Amino acid sequence: MAPPPPRRPVVQRSLISLLLFPVVLLGVLTAAAAGAGWAPVQGEGLLPAAAARADVAGRGLRPQRRRPPPTTASAQSWTCMDLYVFATPYRIGWDYYITAQEHTFEIKAWEEPGEMEYVKQHGIAIFLMPSGMLGTLLSLIDVIPLFSNTIWGQDANLAFLQKHMGASFEKRTQPWSANIRKEDVHSGDFLALSKIRGRWGGFQTLEKWVTGAFAGHTAVCLKDENGTLWVAESGYENKKGEEVIAIVPWDEWWGMALKDDSNPQVAFLPLHPDVRARFNETAAWEFARSMYGKPYGYHNMIFSWIDTMSDNYPPPLDANLVMAVMSMWTRLQPLYASNMWNEALNKRLGTEKLDLHGIITETGKRGMSFNQLLTIPEQDDWEYSDGKSTTCVAFILSMYKKAGVFAPFTESIQIRDAYMLKIFEDNQTRLPSWCNSGADRLPFCQILGEYKMELPEYNTIEPYANMNENCPSSPPTYTRPLGC
C-alpha cells in the first residue's frame, strides 16, 4: 500500500486558474438569462460571408449585408443600452448600442484563414444580453460572492441554489457532526459531499446547476485486510497543488472535513446488504491501487453533463456559447484548455493532437455539428496522455464495476448521478444509530453539515446498460425520462 499523501495545501494554483473558466462562463450566462439566446447570423438578419460581398479596406475585411442588420428600434433593457456579443470559434467581440438605429459591427481582419472558412459555412453567432451593460455588470457582481469564503459567500451560494435548483436548505438540529463508529462502515459505502462557500463552494454550485446533481463531490470507503478504514477519492490535492486520486486514512480524511472552512455537508450512503454481499473487496483494492496518484479527470469533466443536443444547457447557454468560451479560454490558458477538452474531443473524433480549431474543422468535414461531437459518450477504455481520466464519480463507479456491483452491465454502464442508483440501503431500521437524529430523519445518513442534504431520486433507478447516455438535465426540474 502506497503511503497516504500529505495534507492539502492552502493554495492550489492550477485549480484557481481552472475556476476562472466557470466564472467567465457564468458571468455571460447570468446576464439577464430570461429572453436571451444565441442565433446564427441569418437569424439576426445577417448573411454569412459566403453569401455576401467582402470589400478589402486597407488590410481589413468588412462584411457587407444584403439584408437589414440588427437594429435597436425596440430596446431590450430598461436602460435602453443593449449589449451584443459576436462570436466565432476564433474570437469573442462585443458592442453596446444606445440609440435606435442601424448599427454595424466591423471585423477588420480574420484571425486566420480558418476563421473565414468557418464563417462562410456557419456565419457568426450573435448573443443578445437584454439587461444591457448595467444588468450584465450587476450579474457579474452576483457571481463573485459565490467564491467568497465568508458568510456573505455562503448566503450567495444558498440563494443561487434555491433560485435556480429549488433547493430548500432546512437547518439541522445540533450536533451537526456524527459520532461515527468505524465498525458500521464497510468497503464500498459511498460518501456524497456538498460545499457551500469558498472557491470549492462556488465551483460546486455551478457544477450542480449545470448537471442537476445535488452533490458536488464524492468519495468511497474501503477497509483493508486489517480492518483499517480508508477513503479513496479522485480530486485530492497533493503537496504540489495537483488534483490526484488518493487513498487516505479515515481519521485524516474525517479530520480535514471537520476543519474545512467551506462548511461541507456530508452524506454517508451505505450499500444495500445484497449489493455488499457481491462487492469484491480484493478487486476494489486492486483498482484503487492501480489508479493511486493519477490525475483527476479534467479531460472529461465537462462532458459528464452533456448527453443531448440541446437539453443539458441551462438557458441561455448552448453549444455555440460553449464553443466560443472554449476558444477564448484556449487563447488565455492554452495548457489548461488542452487538459480540459482538447484530448477528449480528439478521442471522440478518433484523431490525435488536433487543437480546438483543427477539431472544429475536422468535425465540419465529417458532416457533424459541434453539438453532436459534445454528446459522444466517454468510453471506459480511453487512455489520455497522463493515463486514465476519471472524475470523482467516474472513479467510484469504475471501482464498483471492477468489484462486481453492476454485473452484468460491467462493460457498458455510463452514469452521472451515482446516488440515484438503486444499490444503497433502503431499510431505515438497518441504518446505524449514529447517522441521524430523530428530528432529522433521512433515507440515508448525514454525518456532517448545518443543513439537511437533498438527494432527489435517491436510490430509485435500477442500473441498466448504456445508462445516462442520452438524458436531458434542464433546470430547474432536471426531468429525467425513464431509460435515457
Image (cartoon, grey):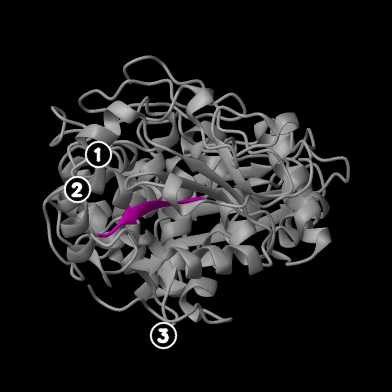
Q: Which residues are magenta?
A: 217-224
Q: Where is mark 3, residue-wise?
A: 240
Separation of residues labelled 2 and 3 (CA atoms): 31 Å
Residue appearing at x 67%, y 63% in the figure: 262
Name the kind of residue labelled 1 in the image: Ile
Give the vertical position of 190 relative to 409 (above or below).
below
Q: Does label 1 or label 2 sit earlier along the sequence? A: 2
Q: For this rendering, which residue is in front, 331 or 188?
A: 188
Q: Is residue 218 magenta?
A: yes
* Disc 1 and disc 2 in contact, CB within 8 angstroms: yes
Q: For this rendering, which residue is in front, 305 or 321?
A: 305
Which labelled disc corresponds to residue 376? 1
Name the kind of residue labelled 3 in the image: Lys
> How many residues crowd around disc 3 within 10 Å: few (fewer than 14), some, or many (20 or more)?
few
Residue 210: x percent and y percent? 53, 41
**Which image quarter is the C terminus in?**
top left
SS for tag 3?
Answer: loop
Q: Where is mark 2, residue-wise?
A: 348
Residue 364: x percent and y percent? 22, 45
Q: Does label 2 or label 3 sit earlier along the sequence? A: 3
Q: For this rendering, which residue is in front, 265 or 344?
A: 265
Residue 299: x percent and y percent? 31, 60
**Which image quarter is the N terminus in?**
bottom left
SS for tag 2?
Answer: helix
Q: Is residue 192 magenta?
A: no
Of marks 2 and 3, the one in the foreground: 3
Give the vertical position of 110 relative to 183 (above or below).
below
Separation of residues labelled 1 and 2 (CA atoms): 6 Å
Toward the bottom, the furthest residue is 240
Name the kind of residue labelled 2 in the image: Arg
